[in-house]
Amino acid sequence: MNRQLKIKPSTARTTAQSHFRTLRLGTPFQPRIEALARTNDWYNWAGYRAPHSLWDEELEYFAIRSQAALFDVSPMTKYRIEGKDAEAFLNRVTLRDVTKLKAGRVHYTAWCDDEGFVLDDGTLFRLSPTRFRLCSQERHLPWLLDSAIGFDVTVEEETEAVAGLALQGPTSFAVLRDAGFSGVERLKIFDLADFPHDGSTVTISRTGFTGDLGYELFVPAAQALSLWDRLMAAGEPRGIRAIGYTALNRARLEAGLIVANADFVTSEHAIRADRLRMPDEIGLGFMIDLEKGHLNGRRAILEARAKRKLRHVLVGLEIEGNIPAEHAIVYHRKSQEVGLVSAAMWSPMAKRNIAIASLARPFGDTMVDDLWVEIYALRELQYQKLMKRAKLVPRPFIKLDRRTANPPADF
């Protein structure tokens, strides 16, 4: 007998109408984050319920720059790649030379399809000579498995099994030290090491997405809440605060860092052919190591360079005034559209109005004068069109010595 026939109509109606109450997956840290949430401002991060903000997005940003900020990165896609050929496999599919990445180190990298267009960017952690963790914005398991044919390697997604936290800000080192992670002071920028925690192990790397002194911590999901509590207890005298994505996004912009499907469209998501980008077109050309042999997209990238087929360039802009130019059109001489701003803000640290923009070559390459942005400012229920001058400036927009200081500063 169909069990559904036994459900009372009123119960069935209530169940159907309340489906929206279970919005998205929760991360292993969700109970702690829910308890701190005041703004109830959530978004979808790879199927997980993640906070745009928790209590005040402005003060959350300043927590990064003046204290220590704790951000849940568990929804970030994570792959465990291991085996005898793990190094050779990753050397084939990613842009940088993996043979130069020693055990206990991390590097920022990217990977392309066969036509040389960027599939994604992310961080590669070398946990041992034959074991790696690849973290990315998008999911790539079918592509990775197809690419692994012929290699003695296993690829497995561990997003749900491994919880992650970003601890960023000037007091982040002091928080870890006070939490009892002995030896964390020896970690230099892009170093990683394992530390005991709650009968298991937490991997701590001196990495982050803020351009500040900071660390990322990865722990089995079962030990997630005890790690959170350990950090919050140790960090209370140092002003530790949990934050949402809006604050982190502002910090990453000041650091001049890019986000997939925000500052560029990944090749698997691009619907229109002219939205595809090669590494050289989004500032990632420095990663390409042509000395290491074949890599995905190598032939197409070399051809584009030789035949000058690269059509775009990603640039940093400084814009007059203090109104952020989010998604503003960039013009040359106020008349010709030459690009689009993908991220913008008034930077409290740089005391400048800054932006990242994608421009058509040769604008942003050789023709860099007389650039303008078109901003629409909402003022008392009416939009006012503002044309503001823009000039090319290098990224990062701010550079903090504490990010790379050895030993890390004790604030």
Image (spheres, rainbow, N blue to C red):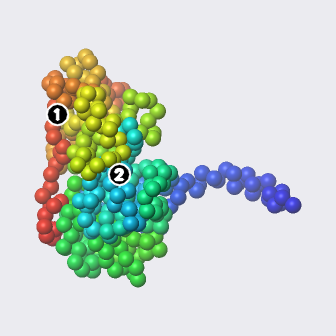
Give the residue drawn at x 23%, y 74%: 184
Q: How far separated are the C-alphas under marks 1 and 2? A: 35 Å
Nearer the camera: disc 1 or disc 2: 2
Give the residue drawn at x 35%, y 67%: 130
Residue 392's label in the rendered image is 1
Say whether disc 1 or disc 2 marks the residue closer to the N-terminus.
2
User: Considering the image in quadrants, where does the C terminus appear?
Assistant: bottom left
Q: Quadrant of residue 101?
A: bottom left
Identify the residue under disc 2: 92
Q: Quadrant of residue 224?
A: bottom left
Please identify the residue farthest to the bottom as the structure is shown: 199
Identify residue type, mark 1.
Leu
Q: Is residue 366 left or right of residue 58?
A: left
User: Quick one: 63 or 275, which is closer to the camera?
Assistant: 275
Circle 1 Cα neighbour tier, 10 Å, few/some/many (<14 / 14–19 / ≥20)? some
Q: Secondary structure at mark 1?
A: strand
Q: Can residue 376 be seen by looking at this rendering?
A: yes
Q: Is residue 6 left or right of residue 194?
A: right
Identify residue type, mark 2.
Arg
**How many marks can you see?**
2
Q: Position of residue 151 (x, y in %)?
A: 43, 58
